[in-house]
Amino acid sequence: MSVKTTEVSSHETDIPGLLIFNVTKVEDERGYYQEEFQQEKLVQAGLPPSFTTVQTNVSYNKLAGATRGFHAEPWDKYITVVKGKVFAAYVDLREGPNFGKTVTLEIQPETCVFLPQGVANSFQVLEDDTYYLYSVNAHWSAELYDHYCFANLADPEIGISWPIPLNKAVMSDRDCNHPMLTDAKRFTS
């Protein structure tokens, strides 16, 4: 008898350290099974072996059009969608020659992303009732908030072509008021 298991493959992006993983599912008449985070397989596919999860968070998004970001924190993230679909946009806010470089992609349950610290994360929900799941290698703390870096979702210099125009999106006041890239704080480790 042959036993099916989750398979993992990856590819690099234009932002150094930002990796996209394809994680397959094993399906039958009951539904599916997926090893969403299997460290040994992910490391073989390129995940830094030093990434150790200390906290996992769920962002439930009730309606398509919910938009969050750009936030860069002093920790790495492993991101996926459990149910639904998002348009994700990343901008490198690390000090150096890649500052301002962007990558966009669609994330569904078979797509996972490794986001290195200092690269700002954002996403726009494309389907109602979307569950966005992410694990981090450091705990959130109010004391670290001064080390976070932000950029404005609508910045024309960043130039993201959002599937749902931002004037029709659901966003927080805080996200709407992040600085433009030219005024954004650079992330330094």
Image: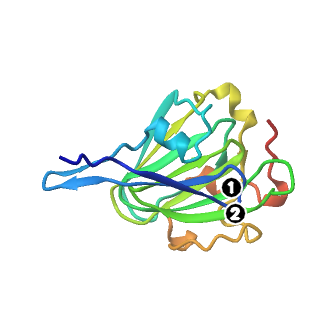
The reply to whether dot 2 and dot 1 touch (C-beta < 8 Å) is no
Q: Residues within 10 Å of mark 1 (few under 14, many from 20)?
A: few
Helix, strand or loop under label 1: loop
Horizontal and vertical percent for residue 88?
55, 60
The relative height of residue 166 versus residue 72 in the rendered view (above or below) is: below
- Specify whether 143 is left or right of 164: right
Q: Residue at x 54, y 58 (%)?
A: 123
Horizontal and vertical percent for residue 94?
79, 48
Which is more toward the observer, 155 or 116?
116
The relative height of residue 75 versus residue 26 in the rendered view (above or below) is: above
Residue at the farthest left position:
29
How many labels sit on residues?
2
Whether residue 11 can be seen here = yes
Whether residue 69 can be seen here = no
What residue would you read off at disc 1? Answer: 177
- Specify whether 18 is left or right of 34: right
Q: Residue 139: name its quadrant.
A: top right
* Residue type beneath disc 2: Thr
Horizontal and vertical percent for residue 76?
62, 39
Which of the two labelled residues, at mark 2 and mark 1, occupies the earlier sequence position?
2
Helix, strand or loop under label 2: strand
Q: Which mark is residue 114?
A: none
Q: Residue at x 62, y 39 (%)?
A: 48
- The CA span between labels 2 and 1 is 20 Å
* Residue type beneath disc 1: Asn
Q: Residue at x 70, y 71 (%)?
A: 159
Which is more toward the observer, 78 or 11?
11
The relative height of residue 65 versus residue 31 in the rendered view (above or below) is: below
What residue would you read off at disc 2? Answer: 102
